[in-house]
Structures are given as structure tokens and as C-alpha cells.
Image: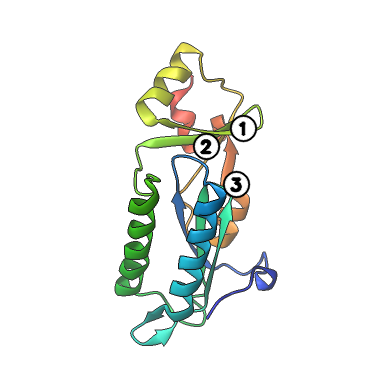
Amino acid sequence: MKIDETNIVETDDYRVIIYPASRPFTPKESKVITEKLYDFLATWAAHGKPLSSSFKIEKNQFIVVCVDEDKEAASGCSIDSLGGVMREIDQEFDLGLFDRMKATFVENGEVKTMKLQDFRQGLKAGTVSTDIEVFDFSKNTYVAFLSDFLLPLRRSWAGIYVD
């Protein structure tokens, strides 16, 4: 079962799981990812009960999966099965979907990803501007995703790295 993007209402607070790639997807990768996730989500279930879910590729670099837990809650096993599909995709295309030691931000309209250590050093040295917006992949509800997925540096989790 899938939630069509047209049916997602901004006030509905679906559970969100975000998988950030370390680089943009190629057109071929986007096509294969889309096909694999459509196939997986069509049969995704928790304890034998279908999950009402959908996904979208955001900024050509992030996979955002939504689950309507008002209908059926995702279980640990169902989340593990999603993780398995995502690991397959990650390994097939070497996307870094599970690397949490990176920072992804928008600078001069361009999405950039850096190792966290390099990002911190860049902010300190001034090679990364403090006039950037930073993505927060920890958002776990759709409303939080809509409102706080991309924030100015000082209001984001990375604000601790600037004076």
C-alpha cells in the first residue's frame, strides 16, 4: 500500500525515515531506486499487516520514506526490512546512505556534502561560509521534516560549531 504524494496533507504527521546520500543520484540510479522502493513498499508489512507508506527523492540526493502509523505502526522487524532494502541500494551504488559522520548543506544554492570533521574545520577556517543552510536528517515526523529539515546554520544542529 502506498501513500500517493498528492494524498499527503501537511497536517498529517506521518513517521519519516530519511536516508541521505553523500552525492546526488544519477538519472539511472534514481530510476532503479524508485523501482526498488515501489516494489518493496507495495508489499511492506508489520506483523503481516500492510503498511500505508510512500517515499520521495528530495533534492536528488535524499530518500524520504513516510509511513502512516495511524493506520498501522511500523514494527522493529518492518524497519529492519526497510533497512535491508536500503543497504542493498547503498551497496549497489556506493551512496553512503548509512554514513552519519557527514554534514550536508546548501551554499550558494548548491547542495554540498562533507565529512563532519572537514565541515567543522571549514567553518573554523572560514572556507565554509556561516551563511549556509544545513539539513537535519534526524527528523522523524512529516511535519518536522516540512518545517525543520533545512535550517540556517545557527538554528541547526551544526550551530554548535560557530561562535
Q: Amino acid at mark 2?
A: Ser
Q: Determine whether 39 is above or below 33 in the image.
A: below
Q: How is the image coloured?
A: rainbow
Please state which of the two labelled residues, at mark 2 or mark 3, is closer to the viewer.
3
- Quarter-of-image position of residue 50: bottom left
Q: Which residue does the image show at 34% across and 37% down from the upper left?
A: 101
Disc assigned to residue 156? 2
Q: Is residue 74 left or right of residue 110?
A: left
Instruction: Point out residue 71 in the picture as x, y percentages from the top left corner.
Output: 51, 82
Cα distance in 3D space between marks 2 and 3? 18 Å
Report the front residue among 146 and 88: 88
Q: Secondary structure at mark 2?
A: loop
Instruction: Point out residue 103 in the picture as x, y percentages from the top left corner.
Output: 44, 35
Q: Amino acid at mark 3?
A: Lys
Q: Amino acid at mark 1?
A: Glu
Instruction: Point out residue 37 in the picture as x, y percentages from the top left corner.
Output: 47, 67
Q: Which residue is mark 1?
A: 110
Residue 51 in sight here: no
Q: Secondary structure at mark 3?
A: loop
Q: Which residue is mark 3?
A: 59
